[in-house]
Image (tube, coloured by chain):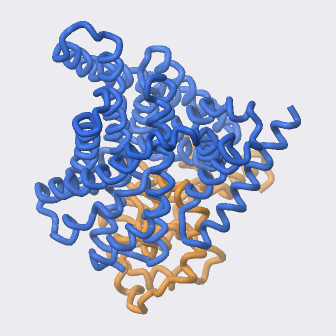
């Protein structure tokens, strides 16, 4: 046991030191965490304790429930209105187009099985704010472009979670019922996904009702953390029991909670501890990279990398066009949508677990491209902000 | 003990049109910056101006999004950022209470018990709560008011 805690200590201090260094170079911390994970993982130095590595699904589940819960916090109906039509339309279109374009290209041109292509496409919708935010802060960018970009990045992860849930159920239906007609399977899968969203909503509603109802019995803030973690994990666990993606349930829990109260204490408490979990999540993801798969997925990774960007560009362009956004936004918003991190990695991990046929290939593709996107992210965000004239 | 018994009714309030310079002038005499209630002409409560709200005006990323993106913020502190910012000198008259105030405020009804007020303050890490009667602003209740109330009840003052 002492070895595990020793390694945990090494992970925290090592990842932190590398992060300090990487941040000096102008890249987001996520890059450092993943790179550190790859470095200590079995593929390179092989110094990480196997028992810690085997805990990575647990860490990922906890990290994902935190991420999804926080994404839900952004869905306050009264605030959605202030984001405006432009943010909504752009976020929906760029998410969906990236999904569909990646899935189609993978299926039609690379001959990937449809379920595999569909799942990889679903991961493509996720974006991550870290790299973009670094540049916005560094250059004190402000203006309509900056505001729209941040809104889009905040909202599209929610569409992404829905798309991932739908894709997983369609993929499962296609794999497990090979005999019947495709159209029938498709219909069932979509009806099933809608059903799942409804069930997730009911579970989330009940959990949040109980959380709110009994919160008057919690007096000290210290106990409140136990209390909210208890309910969050309960919700995530129950949804897994019913085969509902926990991403969906946790997001809905966050959204319902944020809508029924102005108190942000539950979210604030999670934010107080989530940094540690995220660090561990990214390091362990990096450490789970299977270097030997890299050669096999290299073409897929390159195509994924490029097609996802094209999807983001076309999607945001169409969304902006419909919303009648100014040309400088229409043409440049996609630069800030390149990075991917937590949601994409988390979704890939889920797929690795659920689809042994192709899940590890998706995971390897995502982890490789995440590192590249995160390294390029700040550069791309800077170009976008410059072109839009806000730095 | 009801909140209405101990609420501090002697509170400086402002309107939406009060500008940043006036705000800072009023409160520069205080030991620390309190929360400032913003009321409409009928005395209805609209929101509060806090130190955070003022800092946020100069920050490129709003607090709400900032909270959500916290894991991506890489440990930036808002006040530290303020050191590095170029703030135009006319900002004092340009920013009004209406821009600075936050409408998402935890409030409490004057009919509630002071025990509830204490719990809300403790859990949300706030020291002061605006007290309302319906939509009307009644006053502020702070941790100090609660302690005063308890001590008064015990006959110490």
Q: Which chain is blue?
A: A
x and y percent of residue B74 in the render? 58, 62
Looking at the image, can residue B130 be seen?
no
Would residue B45 appear left or right of A80 to someone viewing this image?
Answer: right
Instruction: Decide which of B135, B77 is in the foreground and name it.
Output: B77
In this structure image, what is the colour of chain B? orange
**In this orientation, which residue lies closer to the viewer: A51 or B107?**
A51
Looking at the rendered image, the quarter that the C terminus of chain A falls into is bottom left
- Residue A173 seen in the figure: yes
From the top left corner, tell me how far across and down residue B53 is, in percent: 47, 68
Q: Quadrant of the N terminus of chain A?
A: top right
Q: Residue at x 19, y 54 (%)?
A: A314
x then y, percent, for residue A260: 40, 38
Q: Residue at x 74, y 48 (%)?
A: A11
**Foreground residue, A210 or B128?**
A210
Rendering quarter of residue B123: top right
Q: So how many labels did they put on this image?
A: 0
């Amino acid at each position: 046991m002492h070895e595990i805690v020793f390694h945990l200590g090494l992970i925290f201090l090592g990842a932190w030191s590398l992060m300090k260094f990487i941040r000096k170079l102008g890249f987001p911390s996520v890059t450092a965490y993943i790179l550190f994970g790859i470095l200590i993982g079995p593929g390179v130095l092989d110094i990480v304790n196997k028992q810690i590595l085997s805990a990575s699904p647990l860490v990922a589940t906890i990290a994902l429930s935190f991420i999804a819960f926080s994404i839900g916090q952004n869905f306050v109906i009264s605030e959605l209105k202030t984001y405006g039509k432009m943010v909504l339309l752009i976020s929906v279109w760029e998410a969906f187009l990236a999904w569909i374009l990646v899935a189609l290209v993978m299926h039609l041109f690379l001959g990937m099985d449809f379920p595999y292509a569909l799942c990889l496409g679903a991961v493509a919708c996720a974006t991550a704010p870290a790299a973009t935010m670094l540049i916005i802060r560094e250059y004190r960018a402000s203006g309509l472009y900056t505001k729209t970009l941040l809104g889009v990045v905040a909202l599209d992860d929610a569409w992404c979670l829905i798309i991932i849930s739908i894709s997983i159920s369609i993929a499962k239906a296609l794999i497990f019922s090979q005999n019947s007609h495709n159209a029938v399977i498709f219909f069932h899968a979509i009806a099933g996904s809608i059903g799942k969203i409804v069930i997730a909503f009911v579970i989330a509603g009940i959990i949040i009702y109980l959380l709110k109802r009994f919160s008057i019995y919690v007096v000290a803030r210290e106990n409140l953390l136990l209390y909210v973690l208890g309910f969050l994990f309960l919700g995530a666990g129950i949804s897994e029991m019913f085969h509902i993606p926990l991403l969906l349930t946790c997001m809905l829990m966050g959204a319902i909670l944020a809508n029924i109260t102005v108190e942000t204490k539950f979210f604030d408490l999670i934010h107080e501890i989530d940094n540690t979990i995220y660090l561990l999540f990214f390091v362990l993801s990096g450490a789970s990279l299977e270097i030997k798969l890299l050669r096999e997925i290299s073409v897929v990774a390159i195509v994924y990398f490029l097609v996802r960007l094209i999807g983001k560009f076309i999607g945001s362009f169409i969304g902006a066009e419909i919303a009648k956004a100014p040309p400088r936004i229409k043409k440049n918003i996609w630069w800030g949508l390149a990075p991917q991190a937590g949601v994409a990695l988390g979704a890939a991990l889920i797929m690795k677990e659920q689809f042994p046929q192709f899940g590890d290939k998706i995971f390897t593709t995502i982890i490789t491209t995440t590192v590249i996107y995160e390294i390029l992210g700040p550069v791309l965000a800077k170009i976008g902000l410059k072109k839009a004239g806000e730095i | 003990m009801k909140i209405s018994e101990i609420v501090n009714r002697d509170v400086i309030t402002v309107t939406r049109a009060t500008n940043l310079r006036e705000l800072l002038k009023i409160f520069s005499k205080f030991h620390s910056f309190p929360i400032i209630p913003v009321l409409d002409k009928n005395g209805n409560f609209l929101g509060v101006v806090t130190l955070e709200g003022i800092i946020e005006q100069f920050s490129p990323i709003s607090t709400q999004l900032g909270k959500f993106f916290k894991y991506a913020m890489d440990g930036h502190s808002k006040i530290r950022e303020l050191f590095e910012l170029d703030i135009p000198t006319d900002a004092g008259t340009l920013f009004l209470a209406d821009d600075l105030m936050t409408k998402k405020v935890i409030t409490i009804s004057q009919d509630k018990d002071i025990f509830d007020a204490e719990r809300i303050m403790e859990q949300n890490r706030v020291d002061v709560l605006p007290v309302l009667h319906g939509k009307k602003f009644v006053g502020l209740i702070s941790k100090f008011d609660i302690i005063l109330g308890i001590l008064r009840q015990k006959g110490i003052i």
